[in-house]
Image (cartoon, rainbow, N blue to C red):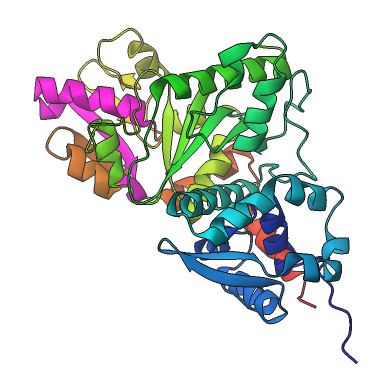
Amino acid sequence: MNAKKNYSKGYRLEIMKLLYMNGAISYNTLKLLPGSPLMNERAYRKLRDEGVVELIRHAGRRMIIFKNYEDKKSEYEEYMPLGYSDYYYDKSKEIRTKVKRGTPSDVERAARCGEVLAIMHTAGINAYMDNCPKYSWNQPYSPNESYYHNSFDIKNASIQYPSYTGEDKNIASTRIIGCVNSPGGDYGVYSVSKGLIEWSRSGELKAATHLKRLSQSIYNIDRNVNAILYIKDLMLIERIVNNENIKRTVNLISIDNVYPEMYALPINDIGIKMTSLLKEELWKEHVYSKFITEAEYNNAKGLTVACDGYDGKHYKLVYCVPDITKLKLFLRKAQADLDFEKYVMYCFDWQEKHIREMAGHLVQINVVPFEEFYEQLCKKMFIMNNIESKEENRCDQPET
């Protein structure tokens, strides 16, 4: 007689919790979960062999979903924290249905949402329902904790806003997939994969305004809301910065006049580490301090050139703070001046390829090894490397 399977801990639980939260995940998402990608893939295969999940292929994506959920849930539902089953029926089950139907836009959105949810979780942001409070007006948050909510939570909160009426309640025309509230800042979260997403500036402005009002309600102070853009192909940044519109009948994603700053991060381990940095208080100041002096920082204020530092001869952009809004303005000025010696940029090695493509002829580029920089900065900021600690925890939890 076979022993009853135990899904109460380990890699399989990580995958199952993500499926409960998102309905479906791409196979690539296994590489973004805490711990070893190899062990996550092995856990997936166990779940597949046990008949818990199945792999389907649609729209160029390999998607993992629950298999025969109604028939199999009695084997593992008891191991899930309170509320997960209700959340799945209320929200995530519909995503699974859409993905199984195979409409390309539904498959792609589910894949991107699942990837971002995994990144947030692995980066140490409270993203699952058992450690994240309900997203609503006047819901107090701990100022020392970081939280992520998906687009469903955002739109549901907009309906509850006390003074919203009529069209103000509707923020449906947005491509936002979530938001972060953290000591390091508040962010609207977006994601692009192989191409640029269609974009309604009025819809995104409404979403950004809504997030700002929510933030004020939660923290009882005025806080800026910026954006994080997760991007699979960093070469797309040039098209975004140049406001390329291939399809003239629609607008594609633009960085103008919506969020003050938009940080472009890759969908991989580096993106996880950068996310863990962006959630920390004063993270930008710590990064700036590695490249520019306080005097240079102050000199840059009020200049016609959008830069982070000015030493009297050189305009300096610290693109290690990966703000593509400032990048666009900086390069626009460099293009107008055509004075290579005056413009200096610092970037990480993972940014070098697209920066050299965009600006190698316009500015001096200084490349910084990311892993070494990240390790040193974590020590300086007393940040626990959440990714490594989670991997150690996984090793203490053998599969059963």
Q: In the rendering, at what x and y percent does residue 70 appear? A: 78, 65
- Is 264 left or right of 342, judged from the image as shown? right
Q: What stretch of residues is rendered in magenta?
A: 323-351
Dominant SS type (magenta): helix
Q: Residue at x 49, y 25 (%)?
A: 226
Q: Residue furthest left?
A: 338
In this rendering, position of residue 35 left or right of residue 87 = left
User: Left or right: where does residue 146 sit relative to residue 63?
Assistant: right
Whether 103 is drawn above or below 391: the answer is above
Q: How many marks?
A: 0
Where is residue 325 shown, x and y percent of the image? 35, 26
Task: Say whether residue 377 is visible.
Answer: no
Quadrant position of residue 340 = top left
Residue 73, above or below 51? above
List x then y, in percent, for residue 212: 59, 18
Instruction: Tell me, yes or no, whether the highlighted magenta stretch contains residue 165.
Output: no
Residue at left offset 66%, top offset 19%: 214
Res. 183 image quadrant = top right
Q: Is residue 170 above or below residue 106?
A: above
